[in-house]
Amino acid sequence: MSEKSKITYKDVVCPFCGTLCDDLEVDVNTKENIIIEVRNACQIGTRKFFSSNPSEHRYEVPLIKENGSFKEVSWDEAIEKTADILANAKRPLLYGFASTECDAQSKGVELAELLGGILDNTASVCHGPTLLAEQDVGVPTSTLGEYKNRADLVIFWGCNPVHAHPRHLGRYSEFVRGYFRTDGRNDRYIVVVDPRYTHTAQIADLYIKVNPNEDYELINALRAELRGVEIDEKEVAGVPREKIKELVNILKTCKFGVIFFGMGLTQSVSHHRNVDTAICLVRELNDHTKFLITPMRGHYNITGSNVVFTWNTGYGYSIDFSRGYPRYNPGEFSSVDCLIRDEIDASLIVASDPASNFPAAAVKKMFKHPLIVVEPHHTPTSVNADIILPAAFAGIETEGTAYRMDHVPLRLRKVKEPPGQCLTDREILEKLIEKVKEKKGEL
Amino acid sequence: MKMAEIKLKLKKEPRYPLEAETITPDYFAGKSIKEIKEAILFHGNQSVKLKEFFEVSGTSDDIKETKILIEGNLSKVKRIGQGMTGGEIVINGDVGMHVGNQMKGGKITVNGNADDWAGAMLKGGELEINGDAGNYVGAAYRGFWKGMENGVIKVKGKVGRESMLWARWAKKAGKFPTLYCGGAGDFLGMHNHGGTIIVEGNVDRYAGADQIMGVIVIKGKIHKKLPSFKKIGEVSEIELPNGDKITGKFIEYSGDHSVKKETNGRLYIAV
């Protein structure tokens, strides 16, 4: 390979997790249109860039399933058939949107409104409870830069960033040197609360083992203790009373504390009430010191989908357009519940893989009815779909905006061309909107 | 005087959820059978007429003198009795979500099970369910800080999670939102601001979480009490905010102390 055909892109934003690292360097062979090297990214982010290279796992032409096997078709035919299915459905589901850029997400909202369907994103099975709790009790939060420069007490509750957000610790929360934390790791006290002794717990200063699904009562006891109330119980959620007192003392005496929480809080039995009480704890800690809380969002633009859906409809997820105007009620309009009750008669999945994440009962019902996926590569959802619309990778093969876990918007970069006939998510949704309008007689 | 009665019989079960907030004495009052048959319901993303799903017979009168009798498996029919101000609805069968939500007066009787959000944000009247009820019975809708404000809900069976969420009394106005039930799920009376809850049987975890005011009486056992509730002592009689009295041996707890150090919230658990 000659040096001429190699281009190095600097300050590339990584489209993998909610940390949205923005210091990547990517080498691209422009002649063959492939990624040859990725620097600074974690292993997961690096693999995501390489997975955009041509392989047997990548879709490059639209496919329609006929008699159990996929047949290559033209874009016109695929869009025509997709629009037919969606326009005739009485309760279509539009789900996903977490791993694509904001423009495509807002097109998704437009399509859902046009169809009178249900619009949902992956927060529904991830940090949706966080949004519910924030609506009930508010949230004291901040950007990650503040934590990097100021926090001297960092609590990881029900999350394992060493594996899920590998560079979070190095960039914002644990090892990094900040303006007031000049000695990096030595200037911070790290607490991990988790039922499992995770790799994050192994490098912490204090590990608190909480019984599974009993986080609520532990936080509840902390809040009571913080108010100076002597609790009757000797042990709460597997943690002795002395240790609770010790933890309250640590919380009260820090200069600047932060709780990062993950799905250990949002998806254990008490769901949004865990987050509700954690936010209340943080609020009350501000009587003694400075304390904030931030959810560890998973997909790189799940925060963006909540933001985009909110400025379009007023609600972050689980939105129903069946009456022509948006309504919101997780549990009633959330995708898993609608699928389990077998209300959905057609699904359009954009940049997501529900078959890997939904309960089996919901996935079975989804496969029963027409299923269309907008997806760059093979997933358990796409191989069971009826129509596959091949998409470009947002943030690798197309530009766009994404929101970091702390609601900071960053511009994604295009480093290579999409292969084959792939179109961007936005272009595909625009084509669908046009076709559906035609079928509904609105053009 | 006998009430004017309108009978609705479900002809076919809806494939999609059927939203039927027009089925209330308020809407039916003073209308002929022909007009009632034309009432709009929502089926999936289509609007349909009531006669497509129901056989209609009988006569209507004023709101207060109108009784609606509904037969059939209505488990996919939502929002029956929404915001009604008077009259009566009797449902013989299971009923879907939001039955009697935001009702202000009158009575609904369900001779079967009810789905989630039964009697949500009730402002008055009576809702009686002679079966089990789903989650969020008499609860506040998402994002609201005022849930049930007045009225009575009686559930023979068990209520689901987070029932009576954000219930709120108005003592001077004589408004005491009250729930009687046979059993309850997690987080009964969450964020309680003055609701009264009487449970005949057992309760799952964390009753009265974040309660500021109000009374929760559990005549059975509680699976797990929150550590922020502190034992006061034993009592043999409880006076409810509305003046009613309950006798029996109970342990009295005050709480939730995670919200306030001194609190008027009370939790009674049978000995």
Image: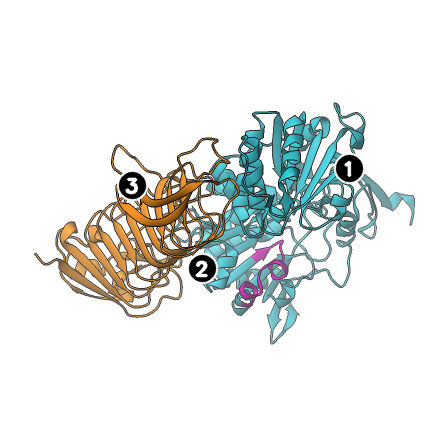
Q: Are marks 1 and 2 in contact (CB under 8 Å)?
A: no
B237 horizontally vs A147: left or right: left
Amino acid type for the residue under numbered disc 2: Arg
Residue denoted by label 3: B176
Amino acid type for the residue under numbered disc 1: Gly
Whole-percent x and y of residue A202?
77, 45
Quadrant holding the N terminus of chain B? bottom left
Magenta-colored stretch includes residue A359: yes
| Residue A121 vertical position relative to residue A88 in the rendered view, above or below | above
| Residue B53 vertical position relative to residue A1 in the rendered view, above or below | below
Output the chain of dot 2: A
Amino acid type for the residue under numbered disc 3: Phe
Whole-percent x and y of residue A261?
63, 42
A220 horizontally vs B215: left or right: right
Q: Secondary structure at mark 1?
A: helix
In front here: A270 or B58?
A270
- For residue B108, say whether it is visible: yes
For the record, the magenta segment spans A349-364
Residue denoted by label 2: A91
Chain letter, orange in picture: B
Q: Secondary structure at mark 2?
A: loop
Disc nearer the start of the sequence (1/2):
2
